[in-house]
Image (cartoon, rainbow, N blue to C red):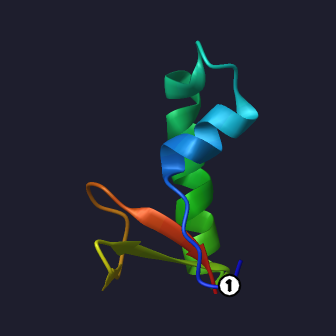
Amino acid sequence: MAGATICPSEVARAVASEDHWREAMPAVHAAVDEMIADGIISLSWKGRDLDRRSGAYRIRLR
């Protein structure tokens, strides 16, 4: 769906088992940083665009 966002923990749960998703979070954050640099995704929180990953955030395809 266009404009939809996803939480990084949802990504981690999709790639790791339910019991180990927290261990996947550093890899998710690293991938997010790379995709931001490549212009693939953007980040937001409570409807406001974020320039970088900091604190809570949601991920959206550009």
Quarter-of-image position of residue 13 = top right
Of the residues shown, which amino acid type is indicated by label 1?
A: Ala
Figure label count: 1
Q: Residues within 10 Å of mark 1 (few under 14, many from 20)?
A: few
Of residues 34 and 62, the one nearer the viewer is: 62
Using residue 20 as the reference point, say whether residue 43 is left or right of it: left
Q: Residue at x 54, y 69 (%)?
A: 5
Q: Which residue has dot 1 on it?
A: 2
Residue 47 position (above or below residue 23): below
Of residues 27 and 61, the one nearer the viewer is: 61
Q: Position of residue 44 (x, y in %)?
A: 38, 75
Residue 18 position (above or below residue 55): above
Secondary structure of residue under mark 1: loop
Quarter-of-image position of residue 61 = bottom right
Q: Position of residue 2 (x, y in %)?
A: 68, 84
Quadrant in which the N terminus appears: bottom right
Using residue 48 as the reference point, say whether residue 59 is left or right of it: right
Residue 25 position (above or below residue 16): below
Q: Residue at x 30, y 55 (%)?
A: 56
Of residues 58 and 26, the one nearer the viewer is: 58
Q: Position of residue 12 (x, y in %)?
A: 61, 38
Using residue 57 as the reference point, say whether residue 62 is left or right of it: right
Residue 57 position (above or below residue 47): above
Quadrant in which the C terminus appears: bottom right
Farthest-out residue, front: 1
Of residues 38 and 8, the one nearer the viewer is: 8
Q: Position of residue 58 (x, y in %)?
A: 44, 64
Q: Residue at x 57, y 26 (%)?
A: 21
